[in-house]
């Protein structure tokens, strides 16, 4: 687990520039969506994802509005994919009965105690999709938590056929975007959780 704060912006930018070289090398041999460019799931993505993604994005906008209206000082904002979205008891914007226990636990931990947090995730999201949400959802303009907690990249491996260098660059790009507008922010990059072999292809 890597922690970043405002004081590490220069280090982060340096590593991002170093990764540019690696990115140019790996981009020539795979079909990974550019992790540095915001985008929404579109051509080449499964129909179930492209059709439901706007609803999930709107759900995150609603959570942001509710947080702003509550005037509660947020301790943490979680950014991510299905793991994060499932903490709200939903998947791709729709409530799922089997995920309600997840929501109950999250509410107990981050809204039933002295800690306050919200989870902004969308199932199957990759780094470019999260970048799009941050930009177009005005996340940084409307939220000012003590900690931004980032867990993204699993789907870049699974669905995006991305190399490790690209996933790292995508994460660093998101961190830099946060720090550019929130220079005193504390950002935590959560290491990716282990995943099983899928369609006979091993993943880290």
Image: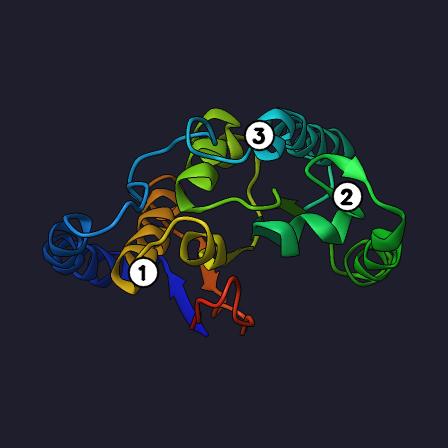
Ranked by sequence position, the earlier of labels 3 and 2 is 3
Q: Which residue is mark 1?
A: 168
**Pointer 1 or 3: first along the chain:** 3
Can the viewer see residue 75 in this picture? no
Tell me residue 136's x, y (percent). Answer: 47, 25
Element under disc 3: helix
Identify which residue is drawn at 65% across, 26% down. Answer: 58
Q: Dot 2, crowdedness within 10 Å: few (<14), some or many (≥20)?
A: many
Q: Position of residue 129 (x, y in %)?
A: 46, 37
Q: Locate residue 178: give its quadrant.
A: top left
Measuring 84% from the left and 62% from the top, which residue is drawn there?
105
Q: Earlier in the sequence, mark 1 or mark 2?
A: 2
The quadrant in which residue 166 appears is bottom left
User: Would residue 201 be found to the left or right of residue 167 on screen?
Assistant: right
Q: Tell me the crowding category of disc 3: few under 14, some 14 to 19, or many 20 or more residues within 10 angstroms, Cα based.
A: few
Q: Quadrant of residue 171?
A: bottom left
State the image coordinates of residue 186 (x, y, percent, origin top left).
46, 59
What kind of element bears circle 1? Answer: helix
In the rendering, which numbered label is found on residue 47?
Answer: 3
Task: Calculate the distance from the C-alpha at mark 1 to the C-alpha at mark 2.
Answer: 27 Å
Q: CA distance from mark 1 to mark 3?
A: 27 Å
Disc 3 to disc 2, C-alpha distance: 19 Å
**Secondary structure state at the residue bearing disc 2:** strand
Instruction: Find disc 2 in the rendering and name its residue.
Output: 90
The residue nearer to you, when weighing 116 against 71, is: 116
Number of numbered discs: 3
User: Looking at the image, is 124 positioned above or below residue 102?
Assistant: above
Determine whether label 1 and label 3 are within 8 Å by CB.
Answer: no
Q: Nearer the viewer, mark 3 or mark 2?
A: 3
């Amino acid at each position: 687990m890597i922690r970043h704060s405002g004081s590490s912006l220069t280090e982060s930018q340096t590593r991002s520039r170093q990764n540019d070289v690696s990115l140019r090398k790996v981009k020539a041999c795979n079909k990974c969506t550019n992790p540095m460019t915001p985008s929404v799931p579109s051509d080449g993505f499964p129909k179930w994802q492209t059709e439901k993604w706007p609803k999930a994005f709107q759900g995150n906008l609603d959570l942001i509005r509710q947080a702003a209206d509550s005037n509660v000082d947020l301790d943490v904002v979680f950014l991510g994919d299905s793991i994060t979205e499932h903490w709200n008891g939903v998947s791709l914007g729709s409530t799922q009965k089997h995920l309600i226990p997840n929501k109950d636990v999250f509410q107990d931990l981050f809204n039933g105690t002295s800690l306050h947090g919200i989870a902004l995730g969308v199932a199957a999201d990759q780094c470019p999709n999260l970048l799009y949400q941050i930009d177009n959802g005005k996340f940084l303009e409307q939220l000012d938590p003590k900690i931004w907690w980032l867990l993204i990249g699993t789907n870049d491996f699974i669905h995006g056929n991305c190399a490790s260098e690209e996933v790292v660059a995508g994460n660093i790009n998101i961190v830099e975007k946060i720090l550019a507008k929130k220079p005193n922010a504390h950002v935590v990059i959560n290491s990716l959780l282990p995943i099983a072999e899928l369609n006979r292809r091993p993943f880290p």
